Image (cartoon, grey):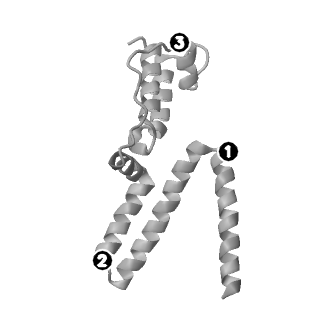
Amino acid sequence: MIFYLLILVLGAVILYFAVSNYLASQPEKFKNTFGKILGVVLGVAGFFLLIRGAVPAGIALAVGAVLSWQGSLWSYLRSRAGIKDAAAPTKSNMTREQALEILELTGNPTDEEIKEAHHRLMMKMHPDQGGSGYFASQLNQAKDLLLKK
């Protein structure tokens, strides 16, 4: 019994340091990775509950797994806790160079390149995908500035 407890504590310590180092080096990827891992864990737990006959609990965990996987579970929990994403600035003082940097573009991109970069980044940063409303608004401002809207 003490052997298993020792293994459990050692595993927890190793996991703690691994997560701490990962979080320190790549904080934006951590949220996405954690959401995927939680989705898998909830999905497996839901599957086992369904097999054992606990249908309502299994369905609830399956729904949680899907929502966690796509990122909307975090948005919902943050809104229920009263945590808001950073508000988008109402007035833009963004320069052309900043807009190019935000959209990861260089030089003098065409309208099509600007729209493609905006779409690619918005697929990652949109609040419905677990991203931040502030970053999504920055992408929109950068696109509008470069397209001169």
Question: In which quadrant of the rendered image does the N terminus lie?
Answer: bottom right
Label of residue 55 in the image: 2
Residue 93 higher or lower than 32, as above or below: above
Q: Nearer the viewer, mark 1 or mark 2?
A: 1
**Nearer the observer, 140 or 34:** 34
Q: Quadrant of residue 90?
A: top left
Q: Position of residue 62 (x, y in %)?
A: 37, 66
135 with respect to 4 (left or right): left
**N-terminal label among 3 and 1:** 1
**N-terminal label among 1 and 2:** 1
**Nearer the observer, 88 or 136:** 88
Badge 2 crowding class, 10 Å Cα cut-off, few under 14, some 14 to 19, many 20 or more, is some
Which residue, given by chain and number where applicable, does mark 1 sit on?
A: 25
**N-terminal label among 2 and 3:** 2
Which residue, given by chain and number where applicable, does mark 3 sit on?
A: 95
Disc 3 residue type (three-letter)? Thr
Disc 2 residue type (three-letter)? Val
Alpha carbon distance from label 3 to label 1: 29 Å
